[in-house]
Image: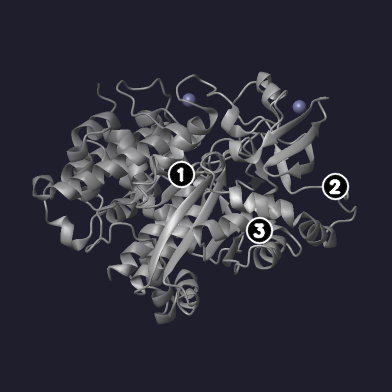
């Protein structure tokens, strides 16, 4: 059974190419999020699969930083509207913390690549123009402007004007790159007029302009000898960018277009991600709450054109649980529903791996840790005891004391606890949050509720129970006092966390310090 990433690598292997180049590109129009960085994750995985397949491959990433700013990205103020139309490369850093707007938005993304095990060569579109990498392609495109115009016109309702050129100079007066109209050229000099009223000329070698997108894309393929490229589905529409750039690549630059990997957008809680409206989730934010491999798992568990929705809130707990389960299946600690399912899940896990773990990483239940952390804070040893008391450890680990854990196991536990803490701080809804009350909260209990709590205290004092046994015993007691379960549990939560509801009662009780619970249930300070 092959994963779709491996199938792409298999097909590429049949191309008559010595060195594959898998390209990705991201527009620097604001924060780089998990939706528009799909490019990079897919490209990197395809490259890896090619290398595993005994081919040679490298991954490149091109920052589309010479394109015009079309919308002010969140959270920048309205005053940034004065930069609309300017190439990103010409806009200053919004907070004065880095060299430029581009660096400001791409740095947080590039900083996460190590954690995701991504190796790539990064290029700046603007710098490529400055360095003259596009010069020959610009000359050729100007010469062949009539042919390119005809290709474009096949897909346009209103044809381009006779003097149209596939090049956008940056206006020397207003600085915009989306308003000047280039109408003639001689040697390397282009004449243009801008809607700001300016009429001027510029030299293509200056880098102060760019090829029209679809021509630029085709030129880029040949410049880097790109053989595969993932891209958002908007480029994949029939008659869209990929189709048109492919024709230009073949007919103008004599180059076979790369193997396309179109992918579907990722929605955030059902909404389209939008950099201008601040609806997005970044790879950096992912690392704050979940394992790096789980983002790969999220992207690779279904085909690239399949719709994916992400929510960092409650659904994230189910997601992590699912990821953990797949990891356990991979390491043979858990059974899949069928052999076919097992093969499939192991494959997905395998392509999602970063450091090639040789044994199951120590990742105790995320959901359970949301409770344990709220009881024990960052005290890892205490958390480990709580896990133990609640049968949350594998058979192998249950016999180990905290001191017996290896450094890497302690590190893994620490990492997960930190992620749980971040999740609680940023995304947890109020009903999962609680605080154990140091003093007895002011509560009024019925006499049956009081008796229930006192019997519970005696039970805990006399016997050592596991969560299931305690659960059963609690029901025996509440029936004895003819209490509805809801009333009994309410009493428990009220005296301990001063809330009507709380985590699952039995394991919650067992997670707390035993002496503390017994005293509290007897209402003793
Ligand atoms: Zn900055
Ligand atoms: Zn202008």
- Which sits in the foreground, 356 or 443? 356
Q: Which type of secondary structure does the marked residue at label 1 adopt?
A: helix
Q: Which type of secondary structure does the marked residue at label 3 adopt?
A: helix
Marks 2 and 1, how far apart at CA? 44 Å
- Which sits in the foreground, 179 or 347? 179
In the picture, measured across the screen, residue 135 lies left or right of residue 153, that is left
In the picture, measured across the screen, residue 175 lies left or right of residue 76, that is right
Decide: is 147 above or below 410: below
Q: Which mark is residue 114?
A: none
Give coordinates of residue 335: x percent, y percent. Answer: 34, 72
The residue under the point 34% across, 74% down is 54
Q: Are marks 1 and 3 in contact (CB under 8 Å)?
A: no
The residue under the point 34% across, 46% down is 114
Residue at mark 1: 283
Q: Is residue 167 among the parts visible in the rendering?
A: yes
| Nearer the camera: disc 1 or disc 3 | 3
In the picture, measured across the screen, residue 337 lies left or right of residue 91, that is left
Q: Which mark is residue 233?
A: 3
Give coordinates of residue 267: x percent, y percent. Answer: 61, 49
The answer to which of marks 2 and 1 sits earlier in the sequence is: 2
Q: Quadrant of the C terminus?
A: top left
Residue at mark 2: 163
| Nearer the camera: disc 2 or disc 1 | 2
């Amino acid at each position: 059974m092959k994963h779709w990433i491996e199938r792409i690598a298999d097909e590429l292997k049949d191309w008559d190419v010595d060195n594959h180049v898998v390209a990705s590109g991201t527009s620097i129009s604001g924060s780089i999020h998990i939706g528009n960085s799909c490019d990079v994750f897919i490209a990197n995985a395809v490259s890896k699969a090619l290398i595993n397949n005994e081919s040679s491959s490298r991954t490149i990433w091109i920052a589309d930083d010479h394109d015009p700013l079309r919308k002010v990205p969140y959270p920048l103020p309205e005053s940034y509207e004065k930069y609309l139309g300017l190439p990103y490369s010409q806009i200053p850093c919004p907070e004065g913390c880095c060299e430029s707007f581009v660096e400001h938005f791409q740095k947080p993304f590039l900083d996460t690549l190590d954690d995701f095990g991504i190796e790539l060569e990064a290029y700046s579109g603007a710098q490529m123009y400055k360095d003259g990498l596009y010069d020959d392609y610009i000359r050729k495109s100007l010469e062949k402007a009539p042919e390119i115009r005809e290709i474009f016109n096949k897909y346009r309702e209103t044809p381009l004007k006779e003097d149209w050129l596939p090049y956008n100079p940056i206006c020397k007066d207003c600085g915009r790159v989306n308003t000047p109209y280039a109408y003639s050229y001689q040697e390397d000099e282009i004449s243009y007029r801008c809607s700001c009223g300016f009429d001027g000329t510029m030299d293509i070698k200056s880098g102060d302009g760019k090829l029209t997108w679809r021509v630029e894309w085709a030129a880029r393929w040949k410049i880097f000898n790109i053989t595969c490229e993932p891209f958002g589905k908007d480029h994949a529409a029939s008659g869209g960018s990929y189709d048109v750039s492919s024709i230009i690549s073949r007919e103008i630059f004599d180059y076979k277009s790369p193997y396309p990997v179109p992918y579907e957008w990722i929605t955030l809680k059902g909404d389209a991600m939008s950099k201008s409206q601040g609806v997005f989730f970044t790879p950096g934010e992912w690392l704050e709450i979940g394992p790096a491999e789980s983002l790969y798992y999220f992207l690779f568990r279904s085909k690239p054109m399949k719709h994916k929705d992400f929510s960092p809130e409650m659904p994230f707990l189910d997601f992590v649980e699912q990821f953990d389960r797949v990891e356990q299946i991979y390491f043979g600690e858990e059974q899949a529903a069928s052999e076919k399912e097992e093969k499939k899940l192991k494959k997905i896990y395998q392509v999602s791996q970063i450091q090639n773990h040789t044994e199951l990483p120590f990742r105790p239940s995320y959901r359970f840790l949301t409770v344990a952390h709220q009881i024990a804070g960052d005290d890892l040893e205490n958390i480990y005891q709580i896990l133990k008391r609640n049968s949350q450890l594998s058979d192998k680990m249950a016999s180990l004391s905290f001191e017996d854990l290896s450094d890497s196991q302690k590190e893994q536990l620490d990492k997960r606890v930190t992620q749980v803490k971040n999740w609680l701080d940023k995304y947890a809804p109020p009903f999962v949050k609680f605080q154990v009350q140091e003093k007895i909260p002011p509560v009024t209990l019925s006499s049956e509720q009081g008796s229930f709590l006192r019997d519970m205290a005696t039970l805990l004092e006399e016997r050592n129970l596991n969560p299931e046994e305690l659960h059963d015993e609690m029901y025996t007691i509440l029936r004895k006092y003819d209490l509805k379960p809801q009333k009994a549990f309410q009493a428990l939560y009220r005296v301990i966390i001063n809330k009507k509801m709380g985590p699952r009662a039995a394991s919650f009780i067992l997670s707390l310090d035993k002496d503390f619970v017994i005293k509290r249930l007897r209402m003793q300070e």
